[in-house]
Amino acid sequence: PKHAAAHNNLGWLLEEEDDEDGAKASYQAAIQADPKHADAHHNLGYLLEEEGDCNGSNASYLAAIQANPKYIDKHRDLYYNLGQLLKKEGDYNGAMAIYQAAIKADPKCSYAHYHLGCLLEEEGD
């Protein structure tokens, strides 16, 4: 796919310069050029989360995982971001499932154990 990586990189640079609208447009252009560009989905998800768009962010994080299931192996923060977002939305079961998936992928993943424990404590388990 043509120029998806360039659009994604430009989005990151624009985000660093506090041009959120330009960054969002660049990430969306990357996704349009290559719908399986997991980095662009992940970056767009983070930007949308920062803007308070939980539904858009959630969809983008899930799209990153669906675009490339092995992407998560190198980007454990995606588990964290998605788990925290689901918790913020009140979807404790969804957040627990994400942290359990993180632990399955990496049994030594301390933040997943910690956040899963916090959720279980809040639930009274």
Image: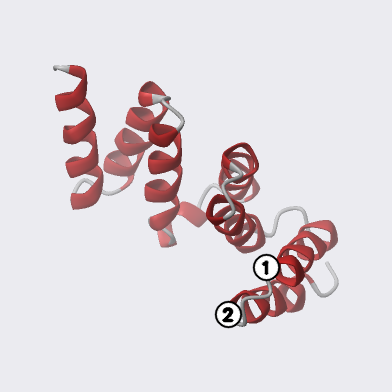
User: In terms of depth relative to the viewer, which is nearer, 79 or 73?
Assistant: 79
- Compared across the picture, whether 34 is left or right of 109 comes to right
User: Which quadrant holds residue 82?
Assistant: top left
Q: Name the quadrant of the C terminus.
A: top left
Horizontal side of 33 relative to 45 (left or right) equals: right
Q: Residues within 10 Å of mark 2 (few under 14, many from 20)?
A: few
- Secondary structure, mark 1, is helix
Q: Label 2 belongs to which residue?
A: 16
Vertical arrangement, residue 113 with respect to residue 18, above or below: above
Residue at 76% of width from left, 71% of height from top? 22
Q: Is residue 28 above or below residue 52?
A: below
* Distance (Cα) linking label 1 and label 2: 9 Å
What is the x, y in percent for residue 18?
62, 76
Residue 37 visible from this viewpoint: yes
Mark 1 lies on residue: 20
Query: Does 123 sit above or below residue 1?
Result: above
| Identity, as a three-letter code, of the amino acid under mark 1 | Glu
